[in-house]
Amino acid sequence: MTIERMPMEWGLRSGAAVAAVVALFGGYLVADAYDVVPGMLTMAEPWPEPSPFPSPPGAVEGPAPAALLESLPEDAPVPDSVEMQRLVTGLAKDKRLGSRVGVVVADGLSGTVLGSSSPDKLMTPASTQKLFTGVAALSSGIASSTLDTKAVLVDDNTVVLVGAGDMMLSAGEGDPDVVNGRAGLADLAQQVAAKVKVDGTTEVRVALDDTLFTGDDIAPTVASPDIAAGYVAPVSSVGINVGLLSDGYGDNGPRASDPGKYAAEAFSAALEKEGLKTAGAVIDASAPDDARVLGQVSSAPLAEVVGFAMQYSDNTITEVLGRLVAVDAGLPGSNDGATQAVIARAKELGVDMTGARLRDCSGLADGSYLSPQQLVDLLGVMVDPAHPTLRSEAVGMPIAGLTGTLDSGHGRFTGTNSARGVARAKTGSLPKVRALSGTVVTADDRLLVFTVLADSIPANETVGATWIYDSFVGDLAAYSVQG
């Protein structure tokens, strides 16, 4: 191997170039150090060390939560019975209320009657009767449940909508923040489509299993004009917007003649939107217990459903609740089974139901009779701490002047009425009938329960009767032992 020697001239030129580069690079380093050109070197004072992140404090016991509203004192003075009787007698003798007036006022804590007039007279309760149905539902085996609407597969291509009593379905998506419309048929259709499409199915037949309830879908003694006016819908195991045909909720208006079939047709349309063809019209079917479940949507908890019925005095939902109580008790899910079950639950809770007769569960039908004392006794059970499951109904009744059927928009408890905001009650209204049953807190912070019934009011006095009642309850709220 030979090594070639480089010419001396090339070597001298190369050395000069290296020296020039070193000189140039050394100059750049100096410039960098003095921050004249960008680089990593600097002659400036170093940045101060950053302050350490603050150490988080250890978990410590927070302050005890404070109640926004204190409980009513148990030693609050009980109203004088002589004075209470004077107020009751004055109300009962008011000629504007007609010849049949029943009134009872009792202490909410002890149950002691403080004033009464015709306490045991059996009278038409109108919608105050709903209190009994609500209590029956909340004290039964279904109290903590939801109403679950299912879709199941039968015969490979038949999707059966199986109702569990939810007549408050939404035709579209469900809304978790509402009671009426909590569960949505569009959501159910989406679940179904997702499962059947996996199997390659593109067309299904829709059927309805509406066998949960039996017998008359409306109590036989409900007046035909009330049905036509939309005060109640036929009871079904499924329904959209309580059977109302209009968007939004109102306590009456045109309703579907067959709410179950109407809901099933809406479900079929929702399946079409999900890309499934539906063959033919909706048919009736009974789904076997072991059918494959394709989807399920759930109502609001039953306590919220009861609260809705009380706030809006909804007849249809109350009738559904009664039939659910009957089914839970092992009775037929019929109108007769429901009324029997409601009366039985009241008896089990200690209410003497002697002479009581219920023709339906909502108080809309003709021929129901309850006494003022029976209603007050039921209220006593509702506010009794020994029955905590009933508290939601006790506090869920409309608030005087503020909510539901006692809202000032209905002309109730307006102006300076002392009961505004401190009374809760269930209303009742039929031709010649006005009823009010609930609780009120006196000026001394004593809880009272009361019922006022009148069922022979002159036709031109029925509207005024509600104002007479409101004034009476206002007097109870304003009462003080100190005068």
Image (spheres, helix red, strand yellow):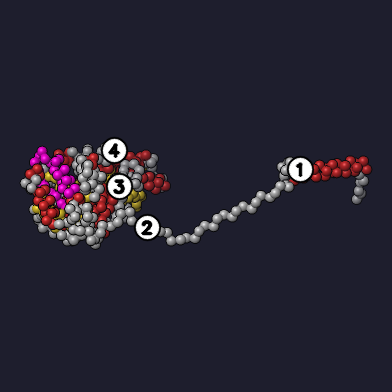
The disc label shown at residue 247, or none? 4
Labels 3 and 1 touching (C-beta < 8 A) = no
- List x then y, in percent, for residue 219: 15, 47
At x 13% / y 43%, what residue is drawn? 465
At x 68% / y 50%, what residue is drawn? 46
Residue pushed farthest left?
99
* Mark 3 or mark 1, earlier in chain: 1
* Mark 4 or mark 1, earlier in chain: 1
Q: Which residues are magenta?
A: 449-475
Label 4 secondary element: loop
Residue ID for mark 2: 65
Main SS category, magenta section: helix
Q: Is residue 156 visible?
A: no
- Answer with the quarter of the image where residue 431 lies: top left
At x 18% / y 55%, what residue is drawn? 481
Labels 2 and 4 touching (C-beta < 8 A) = no
Q: Label 3 is placed on what type of residue?
A: Val
- List x then y, in percent, for residue 319: 20, 49
Residue ID for mark 3: 179
Crowdedness of circle 3 by 10 Å Cα count: few (<14), some, many (20+)?
Answer: many
Labels 3 and 4 touching (C-beta < 8 A) = no
* Mark 2 or mark 3, earlier in chain: 2
At x 73% / y 41%, what residue is drawn? 37
Residue ID for mark 1: 31
- Answer with the quarter of the image where residue 116 lies: bottom left
* Mark 2 or mark 1, earlier in chain: 1
Q: Label 1 is placed on what type of residue?
A: Ala
Gap in angstroms between the C-alphas marked 2 and 4: 42 Å
Q: Label 4 is placed on what type of residue?
A: Asp
Gap in angstroms between the C-alphas marked 3 and 4: 15 Å
Label 2 secondary element: loop
